[in-house]
Image (cartoon, rainbow, N blue to C red):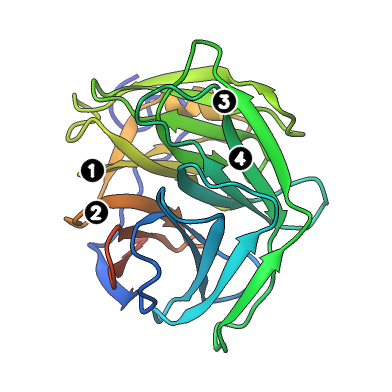
Amino acid sequence: GTAGSGGTGLGPCPTFAAGVELAKVAFAGVNEASGVAESRKSSGVLWINNDSGDGPKLYAVGKDGAHLGVFTLSGAQAQDWEDLAVGPGPAAGESYLYAGDIGDNAAARANIKVYRVAEPALSASGPAKDVTLSSVETFTFTYPDGAHNAESLMVDPKTADLFIVTKVSSGKSAVFRAAAPLASGVLQQVATLNFGTAPLSGGTLTTASDISPSGDLIAIRTYSSAFVWRRGAGMTVGVALAGQPCTIPQKSEPQGEAIAFLADGSGYVTVSEGVNQPVWLFTKQ
């Protein structure tokens, strides 16, 4: 189709205000933020994971930057955690944290793992607490065509399907799906995206992705650019990603590897690797 809706019933590209600093992450233990997601249970709380070299931990951070706790996933390993998502799962009405041990710089891993645990509730006013989360589920996935490096994990709020976007220096990223109800096994490729060339101009290396809480926007970022795809009612993620992307604003970050929609759909946030990095907020206009 032509630019714009192209007759698919999709609205125009959404617009977002330029990023403003929400807060700086206070806790120095968050030094390689690689994924972010907003809590669905606790207002004003962000979940963040570090890159490789850290244990199987998620950090709770207030929107004011306050340190709210370290949450260790019992029985999980952390080879190279790269992204996280909050989404639905087996129990109706329950929200779950999904941690993606999907990094594979050498493209040499025999398999990748995603951990799922029911999201704990906590207070945005603290005090900080260190908690071990039990009843962690482990899913072991392989790709149909051999190993891939990936830093982008997202869960569809409508279907609970899980998606992984590969990170490739050529910019030719594959998108793979694990259908709900999740079970270990072989992922299915549902899309191919060409980063670094128009309309996905900018960097070639994908670092994070997320699906909006209502399921109507799919965001994928690189170190230097960010995009959303519009998704109509009843449209699969794969079909939506075959549509025309919309460029969305982002900040120049030292090493930007995280993006997440806010739980109320009012915008999105990004955060970079490094100590005391700002959380940038981009509000939907």
Residue at 39% in and 67% down: 30
Q: For mark 2, what is the residue?
A: 250
Rendering coords of residue 278 (x, y %): 28, 70
N-terminal label among 1 and 2: 1
Question: Left or right: where does residue 234 sit relative to residue 218?
Answer: right
Q: Mark 1 points at which residue?
A: 225
Q: Which residue ends up furthest to the top in the rendered image?
A: 145
For marks 4 and 3, give the one nearer the viewer. Answer: 3
Looking at the image, is mark 3 or mark 2 earlier in the sequence? 3
- Which dot marks residue 114? 4
Residue type highlighted by circle 1: Ser
Gap between marks 4 and 2 measured at Cα: 27 Å
User: Residue at left 41%, top 48%?
Assistant: 52
Where residue 161 appears, as percent x and y from the top left, is 65, 35
Q: Distance between the residues labelled 1 and 4?
A: 26 Å
Callout 2: 10 Å neighbours few (<14), some, many (20+)?
many
Q: Which residue is drawn at 60% across and 36% down?
A: 113
Mark 3 — residue? 111
Q: Is residue 136 above or below residue 180?
A: below
Do the residues under discs 4 and 2 have CB atoms within 8 angstroms? no
Rendered-image quadrant of the N terminus? top left
Which amino acid is tagged 4? Val
**Which amino acid type corresponds to the residue marked 3 in the rendered image?**
Asn
